Image (cartoon, rainbow, N blue to C red):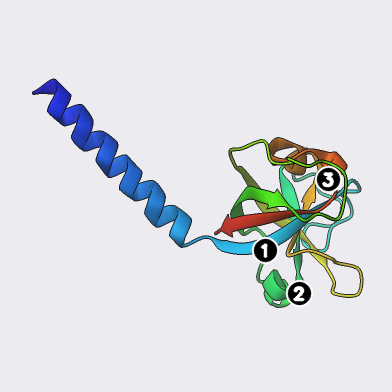
Amino acid sequence: MALEMKSALAMVLALLSFVSMTSAIPGTATFYTQYVPSACYGNEDEGTRIAAASDTLWDNGGACGRMYRVMCTRGTGDYGAAQPCKGGSVTVKIVDRCPSTSCHATLDLSQEAFSDIADPVQGKINIDYTQ
């Protein structure tokens, strides 16, 4: 009986992860190192697992405080590391805006958040993200 329950639980978990992955949105991520001041919180320290939202996500400031789960899917081919992704994901809080005039990604992650999921040598990665 215990073996059957473990098998059923494993199947449910596999299905849940599939549903989670199918609702993920593809995009790109870069990173930055100056965290304050931010467009959302001024000079308040919001930690190191933070991000700036591109104009696509900014929502006239409505993005402030939103949390996104970000996963590296592959490199962009623009920079160094052949296999930049480390696996896993990182959850970041939107604290800033990355305007289209200077933003070259969907999310501009803090260096620490970027390093959690990819080799920083890469500079820019393809991602999947969910709110």
Q: Is residue 77 left or right of residue 88?
A: right
- Are the residues at dot 2 and dot 1 in contact (C-beta closer than 8 Å)? no
Relative to 7, say whether 122 is above or below: below
Residue 32: image location, x then y, percent: 87, 50
Quadrant in the picture for residue 38:
bottom right
Q: Is residue 87 left or right of residue 53?
A: left
Residue beneath disc 1: 27
Q: Residues within 10 Å of mark 3 (few under 14, many from 20)?
A: many
Quadrant of the image containing the C terminus: bottom right
Q: Residue at x 85, y 49 (%)?
A: 123
Relative to 99, say whether 67 is above or below: above
Q: In terms of sequence position, does the residue under pointer 2 or pointer 3 come before the other?
A: 2
Residue 1: image location, x then y, percent: 8, 23
Mark 1 lies on a secondary structure that is strand
- Residue 77, visible in the rendered structure: yes
**Residues under labels 1 and 3: Cα distance?**
15 Å
